[in-house]
Image (cartoon, rainbow, N blue to C red):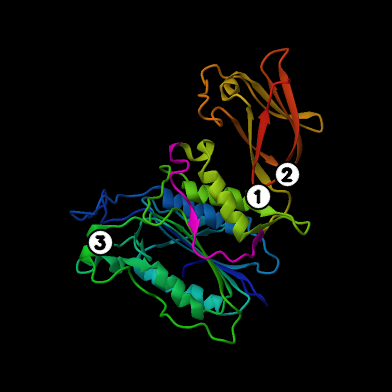
Amino acid sequence: MFTIRSEQGAGPGTHALVIGVGRYPRLGGGDNAVANPDGMMQLSSPPVSARALASWLLGEYRDVQKPLRSLSLLLSESSPAPFVDPRTGTAHTVEVADIGNIVAAVKEWKLRGDSDPGNRLIFYFCGHGISQGDDMALLAADVFADEDNPLNGALDFKNLMNGLKRCKASQQVFFVDACRASSDVLIELSGSFAGQVPLGPGMRPLDLPRRLHVPFYATLAGDRSHARPGQVSLFTDALLKSLRGAGSDDPEGDWRVTTTRLQEAIDHFMRQPQFAGAVAGVQVPTVGELPVFDLHQLPGTPVVPVYVGCNEPRENALARFVCRQGGLEQLRRLPDETGAADDADDTAGEWSIELAFGEYEFEAQLSELDVRRKLVSVRPAYRRVRLAAAV
């Protein structure tokens, strides 16, 4: 009922559950808003973000040892529309991300994970979230629908992870793109924190392989996450860029994204003003446990963020930057007299580009007599190129 793709196959596979909640009828701006939603409003980014990640999983995800076997998708959006599989072109009706559907989808997803101990589970949620200590509630579309206990419309994330200890799937990855701040209103009105528990807790059977699970969070506990209205959220954008190459390495000759490199790359993007703007360094992505294993195999060379600038930041706006490979010009940026930089910020006015792995020559021309060049090897997670004047 919730599945966009379901394929049979012998051996281990990957099973994904993707949830994006933006339309909340009972939060601020909703059709039936409660009197005090504790400042929580409608969101436009989560459905866009969930669709983007689902499209990546269906169209780009690659692991020959654990191929994608199934993907389930739930959305709550102001203007519901079919989801189109990027590979098959098939349009799918998407069920609403209310708590009843989320609980049912979790149970189906867990059963698919039970099909082989070598399976990998991927869970993604984007929407409103609240936290208190180690507890975290992921708010479904119908939060506040139960007036006696509003968090009956939420998923208890900590106990979701605990309940999956008994699932046979030995690799379990969670991406939580939501705020982790508290909500006095919801906590005070709810009989228990932090929402519904689809899977009861229990010990992992001794005959199963050790469970390796990694929860990636968009922000630190107690903090808020940020998004751009109507666009993919900052965290999910950083996640996708990292999966496409910035979070990869080639210790065995082929390019693979590992759990540790993925976290390193996401953190890098979230600290860059060119990417995160005013919240650079403010929203700090984090992880719970971090066992190391491969997540994705790139089909070719990775795409790497590169930041080109002069040693003196004030010169960045005055320079003509050029990027060449094998003597051929690939990209250029003309001077911008209006973008004078402050010396206090040594990254201001940098030229931010993305390049495939390889060797490039970078040039900064400030005048006919002041031309600076440097040959640089570009590889993940990122490369910063400083062009200094000749001594």
* Residue type indicated by callout 1: Gly
- 87 or 343, which is in the foreground? 343
* Labels 2 & 1 near each other (Cβ < 8 A): yes
- Determine the CA span between mark 3 and mark 2: 48 Å
* 300 with respect to 309 (left or right): right
Q: Residues within 10 Å of mark 1 (few under 14, many from 20)?
A: many
Find residue 377 and name its label.
Answer: none
* 12 with respect to 280 (left or right): right
The residue drawn where x is 66% and y is 75% is 9
User: Mark 1 falls on what kind of element?
Assistant: helix
Find residue 357 and name its label.
Answer: 2
- 356 or 274, which is in the foreground? 274
- In the image, is residue 316 part of the stretch drawn in magenta? no
* Residue type indicated by callout 2: Phe
Image location (x, y in percent) of residue 151: 28, 66
Region in magenta: 278-296
Image location (x, y in percent) of residue 14: 60, 68
* 297 with respect to 71 (left or right): right
- Determine the CA span between mark 2 and mark 1: 9 Å
User: Mark 2 falls on what kind of element?
Assistant: loop
Find residue 186 and name its label.
Answer: 3
Residue for badge 1 = 245
